[in-house]
Amino acid sequence: MTGEIVGRRSAPIEHTLTAAEIRAYADAVGDPNPLYRDADAARRAGYPDIAAPPTAAAIFMMKPVLALLTDPELAVDLGRLVHGDQAYEFARPVVAGERLTVAGEVVEAYARAGHQFIVIATEARDGAGEAVVRGRATFVVRGGGER
Amino acid sequence: MSAGALRPRFGDYPVGAAIPPLVRTVTREQIAAYAEASGDRNPIHLDEEFARSVGLDGIIAHGLLSMAFLGTMLTEWLGDPAALRSLSVRFSGVVRPGDTLTCTGEVTAAEVVEGSGGRVGRLRLALTGVNQRGERVLSRGQAVVELPL
């Protein structure tokens, strides 16, 4: 199935990033920055509200990825799924309360050394339609390249 | 903002300069908290028995959790998350509960560019993450940041 999945897209997914989500993320990764917790500190730094750590993009950027990888037609075995690499480009930090539209597309798929590799590009746009985060990630299905 | 005074300046980071490193020990509780916070509840991160059933030696941390340590290292140094323009990394080794990661970054290119708000200094950094056995678990890490001149 390696080649024919290229071009497959997720349906656009709406996600409103909340202050609670940002805080839970910052707590989980152990980042103590007050900008991610304290609206006053964030405003003093020039943000309209609590800012999200750049890598908190994972909260919304993984949604289309998981939608694509768990599509019954792709039938990826989650137990064999490994995240191979991840790249992000940030236009600006996302702030609490922003409603984003996120979409993903399979841009490459190949088998190598007995494993299957799936490359997914993602993009999150803000309410004005501007891209705020772009992502590109490789996922490896261990043993998935065998035939 | 008071932290503004502490923001690094472009001229202090020539090619070859290192940024302050970050050391983090990953715990089982942290992996579970990350799964909840990120929404990635793949059982290879949460269920010991499941992880073993698919050929792992036990649960493993999300690659994106290790990547978050690189993000924290960079934004703690930068003082403002808006200064981080891109971040990429390859997950080259498994991270398990109890592993201690040491993240480091070094400037590989420095140039002055015309930004939206005037001239800024743009640095490219190479980033790595090494575990307590010296194994590189984060490799080919790269970031682009923008600093005041």
Image (cartoon, coloured by chain):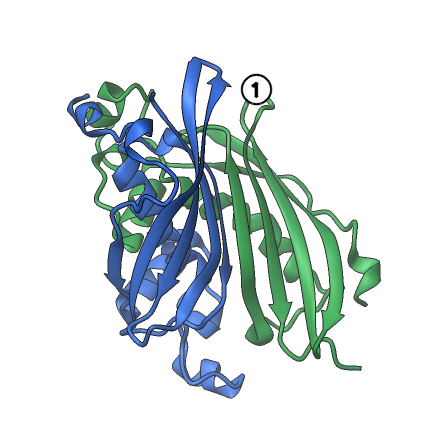
Chain colours: A green, B blue
Nearer the observer, B103 or B50: B103
The residue at the point 26 percent across, 20 percent down is A43
Nearer the observer, A14 or A78: A78
In this picture, is A107 found above or below A22? below
Q: Chain of mark 1?
A: A
Q: Is residue B93 visible?
A: yes
Q: Tell me: B132 left or right of B110.
A: left
Q: Which residue is the extreme one toward the top?
A: B118
Disc 1 crowd rating (10 Å Cα; few below 14, some 14-19, many 20+) is few
Nearer the observer, B142 or B87: B142
The residue at the point 45 percent across, 55 percent down is B39
Please provide percent x and percent y for residue B123.
Answer: 42, 35
The residue at the point 51 percent across, 87 percent down is B53
- Can you tell which quarter of the image residue B54 is in? bottom right
Please provide percent x and percent y for residue A72.
Answer: 71, 65
In this picture, is A67 found above or below A124? below
Q: Tell me: A124 left or right of B10.
A: right
| Amino acid residing under circle 1 | Ala
In what quadrant of the picture does the C terminus of chain B appear? top left
Give the labeled residue for mark 1.
A128
The residue at the point 79 percent across, 58 percent down is A5
- Can you tell which quarter of the image residue A125 is in? top right
Please provide percent x and percent y for residue A83.
Answer: 54, 63
Q: Tell me: B34 left or right of A105.
A: left
Q: Tell me: A100 left or right of A77.
A: left
Please provide percent x and percent y for residue A34.
Answer: 21, 35
Q: Is residue A96 visible?
A: no
Q: Which residue is the extreme one toward the left?
A: B2
